[in-house]
Image (spheres, rainbow, N blue to C red):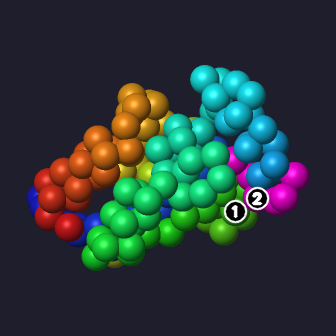
Amino acid sequence: MTKDPIKKLIFVYNANTGIKNGLLDIAHKIIDPSTYDCKLCELTFGTFREKSRWKKFRTDHKIEMEFLHKDEFLKVYASKFMPAYSFPIILEVTDHSMDIFMGTKDLNTFTDTQKFIDDIQYRLTSYGS
């Protein structure tokens, strides 16, 4: 059985929306970055802005990407049939399903944005997307 091609990746940050939450995240990154609980945030954003290497990958890649904070994801995709995901997470969407592309455990292994990008590209190529 062949796997359906991936149509979209959904990146879900382990952070909530809002100015207050954003300011708390910035403070956390500055004061005690080793305990910041969103590896996806760390890989894609610096303290104040999106990392340029990540932004180039995101804007140049052909696959559709959606970026959501945890509270936004739970509001948009809430379903009693949805598994209990841990965050951050990257989900893959095909014509017939939504599955884990890269889970929290995998994300937490990365220490470098380029290696993270390389892994995403490898996985997409492996899936034929």
Give the overall secondary structure of the magenta segment: loop
Q: Residue furthest right?
A: 20
From the viewer's perspective, tell me whether residue 32 is left or right of residue 104. Answer: right
Tell me which residue sits at (57%, 47%) in the image. 46
The image's mark for residue 72 is 1
26 lies above or below 75: above
Nearer-the-camera pick, 55 or 105: 55
**Residue at image mark 2:** 17
Between the C-alphas of marks 2 and 1, the distance is 7 Å
Query: Which numbered disc flags the more N-terminal residue, 2 or 1?
Result: 2
From the top left corner, tell me how far across and down residue 99 is, in percent.
Answer: 40, 54
Type of the residue with mark 1: Glu
Q: Nearer the viewer, residue 2 or 6?
A: 6
Q: Residue at x 60, y 57 (%)?
A: 49
Residue 60: % across, % down: 31, 73
For the N terminus, the image quarter is bottom left
Q: Position of residue 74 (x, y in %)?
A: 68, 58
Is residue 40 visible in the rendered image? The answer is yes
Graded by Cα atoms within 10 Å as few (under 14), some (14 to 19) or many (20 or more), the crowding at tag 1 reads some
Answer whether residue 99 is magenta in the image: no
Q: Is residue 124 above or below residue 33?
A: below
Q: Residue at x 77, y 52 (%)?
A: 22
Residue 11: give x, y in percent of width and height: 50, 57
Identify the disc placed on residue 61: none
Q: Is residue 106 visible?
A: no
Disc 2 is placed on an element classified as loop
Q: Which residues are magenta?
A: 15-20
